[in-house]
């Protein structure tokens, strides 16, 4: 367990250093992974997929939301010049690689953009995929 704590500390420290040198302020996300998961389940309303305005993914305001694939799916919320990053495990949430149609990898959306929330395996809870709904869905 001490190694896991040290690894998290090093990871968080590295993120702060990168953010500082990149010229943007990093802040903690105003939502937890659990709260986000529960919110997405509510948006699905018992269905296997739903097209929603991206702004409905959270109860807090943001200007842009960027999706990045890393060791986990990173949701990067730009909130008036401050960036909040919410890491999500791939077992629960993912976006396809950029070459796949409608992928949101390395893409940013605004609150009014429509996205597709879709269970990878209909009838199961996870994983849930986010896609661009502009071209289909």
Image (spheres, rainbow, N blue to C red):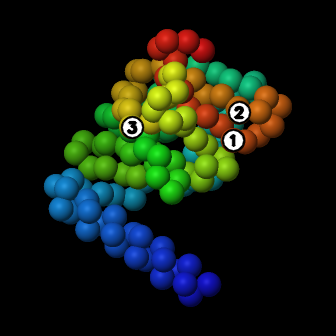
Q: Which residue is mark 3?
A: 106
Residue 26 at x, y percent in the picture: 30, 57
The reply to whether dot 2 and dot 1 touch (C-beta < 8 Å) is yes
Residue 21 at x, y percent in the picture: 18, 62
Side (left or right) of 40 relative to 83: right
- Is the N terminus in the top left, top right, bottom left or bottom right quadrant? bottom right
The residue nearer to you, when weighing 98 against 35, is 98
Estimate the spatial distance between the alpha carbons at disc 2 and disc 1, rounded to whole Å.
Answer: 6 Å
Side (left or right) of 129 relative to 100: right
The earlier-in-sequence mark between 3 and 1 is 3
Q: Residue furthest front?
A: 99
The earlier-in-sequence mark between 2 and 1 is 2
Q: Secondary structure at mark 1?
A: loop
The residue nearer to you, when weighing 109 against 69, is 69
Above or below, comparing residue 21 to residue 124 in the picture: below
Estimate the spatial distance between the alpha carbons at disc 3 and disc 2, rounded to whole Å.
Answer: 20 Å
Residue drawn at 61 percent across, 28 percent down: 117
Q: Is residue 115 visible?
A: no
Q: Tell me the number on the disc at residue 127.
A: 1
Q: Which residue is mark 2?
A: 120
Above or below, comparing residue 106 to residue 103 in the picture: below
Estimate the spatial distance between the alpha carbons at disc 3 and disc 1, rounded to whole Å.
Answer: 19 Å
Side (left or right) of 115 relative to 42: left
The reply to whether dot 3 and dot 2 touch (C-beta < 8 Å) is no
The reply to whether dot 3 and dot 1 touch (C-beta < 8 Å) is no
Residue drawn at 65 percent across, 37 percent down: 128
């Amino acid at each position: 367990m001490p190694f896991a704590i040290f690894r998290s500390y090093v990871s968080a420290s590295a993120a702060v250093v990168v953010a500082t040198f990149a010229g943007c302020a990093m802040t903690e996300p105003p939502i937890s992974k659990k709260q986000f998961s529960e919110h997405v389940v509510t948006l699905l309303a018992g269905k296997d997929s739903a097209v929603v305005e991206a702004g409905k993914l959270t109860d807090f305001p943001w200007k842009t939301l960027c999706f990045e694939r890393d060791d986990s799916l990173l949701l990067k919320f730009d909130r008036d010049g401050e960036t909040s990053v919410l890491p999500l495990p791939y077992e629960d949430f993912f976006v396809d690689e950029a070459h796949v149609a409608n992928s949101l990898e390395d893409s940013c959306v605004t609150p009014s953009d429509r996205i597709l929330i879709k269970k990878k395996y209909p009838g199961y809870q996870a994983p849930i995929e986010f896609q661009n709904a502009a071209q289909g869905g």
